[in-house]
Image: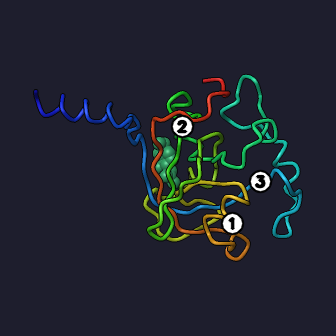
Amino acid sequence: MKAQTIVAAAAALFGITAKATFSGTGFGTWYYDLEESEICGYDVSSLNNGNALCGWYTARTLEQVGSEYLVAMNDTQLKEDLTGYCGMQVIVTVNGVTSDLPFFIGDGCQRCSEGSPDATTYSESGAPGLDFSYPALNALSGGEACDDGYIEISWEITDNKIYDLFDA
Ligand SMILES: *[C@@H]1O[C@H](CO)[C@@H](O)[C@H](O)[C@H]1NC(C)=O
């Protein structure tokens, strides 16, 4: 057997089918909460009723999706390949600890699309990263989501589709 065949066979045997389609480092922020309408002193009720970009045809709002694991990514990048990213699992690492929370791509994040993709300092007007629900960012940060409003993260978007109720 050729080396590639052996690797493919091993991957199939152990059920490893996901490969990273995009990975990066940057900043995690929060933008919605399905339980509370006010977070860290901000009214988020209109955001909860906002359409998730991945539900472009059926116009699914964040509330209709109903999962606090929905994550927003670089808006421009997502629009370039909706079918490639929507519903795909995202593996998030904070301070060297990889989270086992089942995050998936569902929306676009404006801040994550602007500024340098290599930026190492956070700016509200543009910095690479992902945007989460408040409970998710709180879980990732050990309860510090309100303190700075952002945390340093790295991530890997896989081709493992774990949410399939979007339009693609
Ligand atoms: C967002 O994605 C676009 C398209 O791939 C890219 O040109 C841009 O640099 C990205 N922005 C950030 C902050 O990563």
* Residue beneath disc 1: 138
The vertical placement of 164 against 106, above or below, is above
Q: Residue furthest front?
A: 13
Left or right of residue 157: residue 2:
left
Q: Nearer the viewer, residue 6 or 106?
A: 6
Which of label 2 and label 3 is nearer to you? 2
* Residue beneath disc 3: 32
Q: Nearer the viewer, residue 14 or 66?
A: 14
Where in the figure is residue 55, as x and y percent of width and height? 70, 30
At x 62% / y 28%, what residue is drawn?
164
Q: How far apart, in angstroms, are the residues tagged by discs 2 and 3?
A: 20 Å
Please, what is the three-letter code of the amino acid marked with disc 3? Tyr
Please, what is the three-letter code of the amino acid marked with disc 1? Asn
Which sits earlier in the primary sequence, circle 3 or circle 1? 3
Q: How far apart, in angstroms, are the residues tagged by discs 3 and 1?
A: 12 Å
At x 13% / y 34%, what residue is drawn?
3
Left or right of residue 74: residue 147:
right
Which sits earlier in the primary sequence, circle 2 or circle 3? 3
Q: Residue furthest bottom?
A: 147
- Label at residue 58: none
Please, what is the three-letter code of the amino acid marked with disc 2? Met
Q: Secondary structure at mark 3?
A: strand
Where in the figure is residue 133, as x and y percent of width and height? 71, 54
Q: How many marks?
A: 3
Q: Nearer the viewer, residue 11 or 48?
A: 11
Where in the figure is residue 100, as x and y percent of width and height? 54, 54
The vertical placement of 137 against 15, above or below, is below
Left or right of residue 113: residue 22:
left
* Residue beneath disc 2: 88
